Amino acid sequence: MWVPSMSISLQGEIRTLAAHGKLTGAILTALPVVIAIMMTIFSPGYMQTLFYHPWGKTLIAGAVGCLVLAQLVIRKVVDIKI
């Protein structure tokens, strides 16, 4: 037997969990960027090695690519259709 209040309650819970997952994904994506900016400001010597080493720019590009890919995967996982 179908009960409308249960269906609405379940839809609300799913929306809440999906929103939580999206927010978590956004925070996890932004966190490495924020940490890199903070390290550049407070301890530039650590980040200068990354910026001036021959592989540094490749590593930065790889990290950005992984962040974008992770954001896409997280959005795909939390995109729940009801």
Image: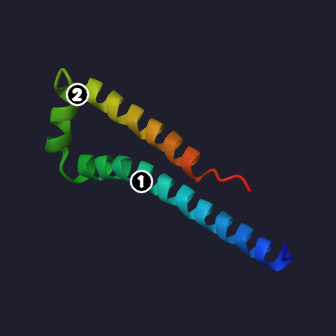
Instruction: For the residues labelled 2 and 1, say whether their Cβ atoms are less than 8 Å apart.
Output: no
Label 1: which secondary element: helix
The residue where tag 1 is placed is 28
- Name the residue: 73% across, 67% down: 11
46 sits left or right of 4 in the view: left
Residue 40 relative to residue 34: left or right? left
Q: Which residue is mark 2?
A: 56
Q: Residue at x 18, y 20 (%)?
A: 54
Q: Secondary structure at mark 2?
A: helix
Residue placed farthest to the top in the image? 54
Location of the C terminus (image quadrant): bottom right
Left or right: residue 80 versus residue 61 is right
Q: Amino acid at mark 1?
A: Leu
Question: Mark 1 packing: few (<14 Cα in 10 Å), some, or many (20+)?
Answer: some
In the rendered structure, which disc, 2 or 1, sits on the residue that comes first in sequence?
1
* Front residue (pair 14, 26): 14
The residue positioned 63% from the left and 50% from the top of the image is 79
Q: CA distance from mark 2 to mark 1?
A: 22 Å
**In this rendering, would 35 be left or right of 46?**
right
At 31% from the left edge and 32% from the top edge, which residue is drawn?
Answer: 60
- Percent from the top left, x then y, of residue 1? 84, 74
Mark 2 is surrounded, within 10 Å at the Cα level, by few (under 14), some (14 to 19) or many (20 or more) other residues, namely some
Report the amino acid beneath label 2.
Answer: Gly
